[in-house]
Image (spheres, rainbow, N blue to C red):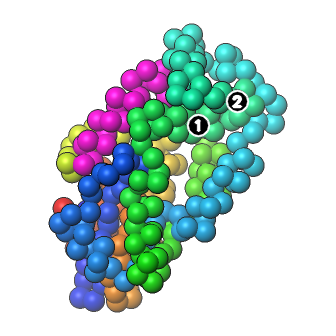
Amino acid sequence: MWLVEDDDTRLYLLGTMHALPAATDWDDGRVGDAVAAADELVLELSPAELAKVGDVFRRLAPRTAPLPVERRLPADALAAYRALEASGPGQPFGGDALDDWAVMVLMGQRVAQNAALSPANGVETMLTARFDDAGKPVSGLESAEGQLMAFETLDAATQRALLTSAAAGAGDAVAEVGALTAAWSRGDIAALEKMVNEDIDAVPAARDALLTKRNRAWSAWAMARMDRPGTVLVAVGTGHLIGRDGLPTLLEAQGLKVTRVQ
């Protein structure tokens, strides 16, 4: 967590995990203090927009014409993909009818399920309940449509590269997401940066669309929000707060005082 502050405004930037194991302890110390002190909560998606994600996904995900996954992936990646598809509940992904980015999203959900990570235990879900109970406002930085369009508008080659990479690493994905969660739990930024960068830097166009452009838009929002007094908890995925194009780095480069507080 970082604090961005001036004379009358404080923005706490909290890096989250969207899905976690049950009973994960994440809100001690300064994080708990920030939750209590904040007048409002800002997430990637407001509760109303989050409720739209499923419908938007079902509208955007289908291909105009089916394309068998067998024709998209090399043999080794295809084998790992099929093994993941057969894991857990074994429900087919229906990938032949879906865009590459959508198949990748479903794979990620299966990995989280296999790793016993649930959105119900995620930081955003818990924070939303607390702020609702306290009668404090909860808003979002993006719309469901805008967030998924960041994937939908990736060019075909970038989508295929992301899918291929995800499928090739599917056999190690549960262990890797466990390592990522553990690094987050101990606040190990170096380890988090290494894991996030290894994934996203393999496809530079994806980094620009999914991280950098969004972070720049959020930094513009943060700069404008600093003009109004108050204390705000901004809780977004940890990948948006670390690295050379992370939100704290972007805001510090614009002259704001940014301090890591936990």
- At horizontal 75% and vertical 31% (from top left) the residue drawn is 97
Quick check: marks 2 and 1 in contact, CB under 8 Å? yes
- Residue kind at label 2, given as amino acid type: Gly
Q: Which residue is mark 2?
A: 94
Tell me which corner region of the image, top left, top right, bottom left or bottom right, holds residue 129.
Answer: bottom left
**Which residues lie in the magenta part?**
163-185
Q: Residues within 10 Å of mark 2 (few under 14, many from 20)?
A: some
Which dot marks residue 106?
A: 1
- Which one is in front, 156 or 162? 162
Q: CA distance from mark 2 to mark 1?
A: 9 Å
Tag 2's secondary structure? loop
Q: How many marks?
A: 2
Residue 58 forms part of the magenta stretch: no
Q: In this view, which residue lies farthest toward the right? A: 65
Q: x and y percent of residue 115 in the render?
A: 40, 35
Tell me which corner region of the image, top left, top right, bottom left or bottom right, holds residue 46.
Answer: bottom right
Q: Inspect this view and state whether residue 129 appears.
A: yes
Which of the image's four quarters has the C terminus? bottom left
- Residue kind at label 1, given as amino acid type: Leu
Q: x and y percent of residue 31 in the render?
A: 24, 67
- At horizontal 76% and vertical 36% (from top left) the residue drawn is 63
